[in-house]
Amino acid sequence: MSLKIQRKINRWNRSNVSLSVLCPSDLKKDTRIYKPQKATLLDKCIIPKLNSSLFDWQKWRANSIHSLGFIACRYRFIVSVYGKYILKKHAVGYCEGENLACRPKLYEIALMCFKDGGEFWFHMRSNEFEEVFCN
């Protein structure tokens, strides 16, 4: 057994965790899932976090990001001055994509918008959302 794994096992022993529940996958850190900056940036968000039960199928089908005037070159248009203005004007709130019952997605944010008397929502990539609402 390597020294690195032995140190991790010793650390687990000190934290009173039973070794019977450990497996090799518990001992290595998956860097694809670990994203510490996400929680800190969403804390600085300028729109409120909404309950995931508000994001249902009817509101998802009601409209899309294209009804706000967005075109095919998505990222560049969203982070432009005009794109940020439009999104901030119509945004009501957000919810993390992995918490949704309807169309859950990892590393994406569901954004609820209000336009022409109706609510609708769509997914945005985390980097797009942070660029518009958390800076």
Image (cartoon, rainbow, N blue to C red):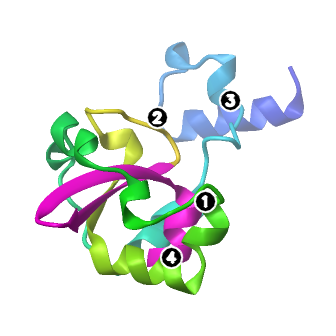
Q: Which numbered mark, 3 or 4, is in the foreground of this view?
A: 4
Q: Which residue appears at 60% of the width and 80% of the height?
A: 80
In the rendered structure, which disc, 2 or 4, sits on the residue that comes first in sequence?
2
What segment is highlighted magenta in the picture? 108-135
In the rendered structure, which disc, 1 or 2, sits on the residue that comes first in sequence?
2
- Identified by mark 1, the residue type is Arg
Quadrant occupied by the N terminus: top right
Please name the residue that numbered disc 3 is placed on.
27
Q: Are marks 4 and 1 in contact (CB under 8 Å)?
A: no
Please name the residue that numbered disc 1 is placed on.
74
The correct choice, above or below, for 22 with respect to 17 in the image is above
The correct choice, above or below, for 90 with respect to 11 in the image is below
Q: Is residue 85 magenta?
A: no
How far is disc 1 from disc 2 in space, using C-alphas?
A: 49 Å
**Which secondary structure lies at badge 3?**
helix
How far is disc 4 from disc 1 in space, using C-alphas?
A: 10 Å
**Which secondary structure lies at badge 1?**
helix
How far is disc 3 from disc 4 in space, using C-alphas?
A: 43 Å
- Identified by mark 4, the residue type is Gly
Crowding near pointer 4: few (<14 within 10 Å), some, many (20+)? Answer: some
Q: Which numbered mark, 3 or 2, is in the foreground of this view?
A: 3
Q: Position of residue 62 (x, y in %)?
A: 22, 45
Q: Position of residue 7 (x, y in %)?
A: 75, 38
In the rendered structure, which disc, 4 or 1, sits on the residue that comes first in sequence?
1
Q: Are marks 3 and 1 in contact (CB under 8 Å)?
A: no
Q: Position of residue 106 (x, y in %)?
A: 49, 40
Q: Is residue 110 magenta?
A: yes
- Identified by mark 3, the residue type is Leu
